[in-house]
Image (spheres, rainbow, N blue to C red):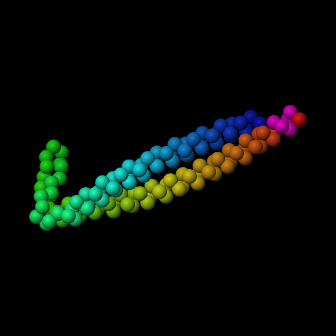
């Protein structure tokens, strides 16, 4: 019985860790989605500019002129990277959800086992 209670505590802690990791990963995905939206907005702005338009990049405290093709290429590269990170993050979220569900089921089964043992002991 004591062994079951210790296992119950361990499972509860493991489930809490899954839930904490899941929340952290969801927060990361939300940040990536915000970055993706920002970069898409920049991409749309670039599309409306002429080739001769002045594009400046902030480097430290200085604004440096940047060629449109270079700026467009940088934003496209960031969007590609962010897209891949979102996919990777969503896979991790799915993995964590499945792991949490397994722990939840183990916890439930163990709680039922303990309850049955207590009912038998008091009956």
Drawn side of residue 110 relative to residue 75, left or right: right
Residue 59 in percent (x, y) is at: 17, 48
Give the side of residue 80 with respect to residue 5, left or right. left
Residue extending farthest right: 123
Q: Residue 21: tell me if it is visible.
A: yes
On screen, residue 5 versus residue 47, left or right, reads right
Percent across and percent down for residue 51 are 13, 66
For the point 38% across and 49% down, the residue is 31
Q: What is the quadrant of the C terminus in the image?
A: top right
Looking at the image, is 7 positioned above or below residue 36? Answer: above
Quadrant assignment, res 68: bottom left
Q: Residue at x 70, y 45 (%)?
A: 108
Q: Is residue 109 above or below residue 78?
A: above
Task: Please say whether residue 74 is visible from this viewpoint.
Answer: no
The magenta segment is 118-122
The residue drawn where x is 72% and y is 47% is: 109
6 or 62: which is nearer to us?
62
Residue 118 at what x, y percent from top left?
81, 36
| Relative vertical location of residue 82 with respect to residue 107 in this rendering, above or below | below
**Can you say which quadrant of the picture contains the N terminus?**
top right
Based on the picture, tell me whether residue 119 belongs to the magenta stretch: yes
- What type of secondary structure mainly makes up the magenta span? helix
């Amino acid at each position: 019985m004591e062994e079951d209670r210790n296992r119950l505590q361990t499972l509860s802690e493991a489930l809490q860790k899954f839930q904490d990791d899941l929340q952290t990963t969801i927060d990361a995905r939300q940040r990536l989605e915000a970055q993706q939206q920002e970069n898409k907005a920049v991409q749309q702005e670039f599309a409306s500019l002429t080739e001769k338009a002045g594009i400046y990049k902030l480097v430290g405290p200085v604004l440096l002129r940047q060629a449109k093709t270079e700026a467009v290429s940088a934003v496209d590269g960031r969007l590609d990277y962010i897209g891949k990170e979102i996919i990777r993050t969503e896979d991790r979220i799915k993995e964590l959800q499945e792991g949490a569900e397994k722990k939840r089921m183990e916890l439930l089964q163990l709680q039922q086992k303990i309850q049955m043992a207590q009912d038998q002991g008091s009956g």
